[in-house]
Amino acid sequence: MQVFRNNFFINTPTLMNFRFAWKYLLYKLFAMHRRGHGIHSPFVYDLLTNVIENDNQYYIFADIENLRNQLLRSKQKMIVSDLGAGSALKNTRERSIKKIVKHSAKNRKYGQLLFRLVHHFKPEILLELGTSLGFSSAYLAAPDKDSILHTIEGCNNLARYAMHNFSLLKLENIKSYNAPFEEALPKILNKIKVLDFAFFDGNHRKEPTLNYFNQCLGKINSNSVFIFDDIHWSAEMEEAWEEIKKHPQVVVTIDLFFLGLVFFRKELSKQDFVIRF
Ligand SMILES: C[S@@+](CC[C@H](N)C(=O)[O-])C[C@H]1O[C@@H](n2cnc3c(N)ncnc32)[C@H](O)[C@@H]1O
């Protein structure tokens, strides 16, 4: 059985599929309309109209998407190691590059949204949990060559392949860490003063997600932005998202179904939005 996820289909157990499809239908029916109708927060209205809805094209988009199309045609396979919660190495298996691109990478729509968010907020220090082949990393690092993106990937072959992709795209502001999140994250956080932007896209379970979130909170300031991937993917991820929304330091959240945006701005009033994207 297959389910619609992040604009493409992946294999998952059937019960989860129905739950997810049902959630997605509810989101499509009841989420706030685009174009900002009914949104009274100037910060969110501006973000919606100038960033989320914006479809400006940038030169790097074509380069990244050409690389994606090239890999989608690739016949190459690689041995991938699966990392579970607590970074336990579960198993290794052979996967085609094509399938990894199709099923793991953020697609063009969400990749370009990540780019626009970075372009808008101008973070200097960015963090990504879950590099895979590096598509979202490329979109995160491309807006400003002077920013630094720290990206972590536990699978050795994926991390190496991603670095190759970064050099093809001439992205020199990415620091790649081939280690479990649990090992690399505290080291990175120790090194940096402020975490301006974080994208959480790996180990989609409640406890690890909340654990990474809590660790990263130690380095935020009022302007920091956190983005969580797949907040509705499972009941566990929804529980994690609910806890994040309730956290006293979290001020505004925006649920775009496949991504959850989190803001800590002290000048805003606490509010949670669900916006159709
Ligand atoms: C969904 S993929 C990331 C996709 C990527 N952000 C993109 O959009 O192109 C998640 C990645 O996180 C890695 N991962 C999962 N749990 C991990 C852990 N505990 N430590 C290190 N890497 C992990 C997996 O190996 C996988 O490649």
Image (spheres, grey):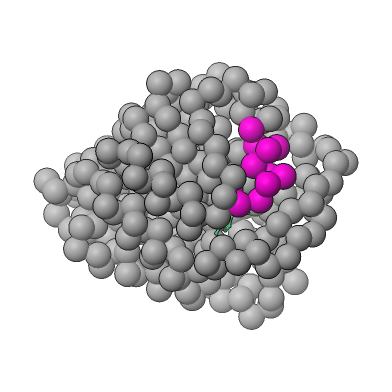
When the figure is inspected, residue 72 is found, relative to residue 13, above or below; the finding is above
Picture coordinates of residue 64 (x, y %)?
Answer: 63, 29
Rendered residue at 76%/60% (across/down)? 92
**Magenta stretch secondary structure, dominant:** helix
Picture coordinates of residue 106 (x, y %)?
Answer: 58, 46
Most extreme residue toward the right is 75
Please state the extent of the stretch shown in magenta in the rendering.
Answer: 153-163
Most extreme residue toward the left is 267
Picture coordinates of residue 140 (x, y %)?
Answer: 48, 34
Horizontal placement of 22 versus 224: left or right? right
Rendered residue at 41%/43% (across/down)? 188
Picture coordinates of residue 87 (x, y %)?
Answer: 56, 63
Tell which of 128 and 42 is nearer to you.
128
When the figure is inspected, residue 82 is found, relative to residue 159, above or below; the finding is below
Most extreme residue toward the bottom is 15
Rendered residue at 82%/55% (across/down)? 94
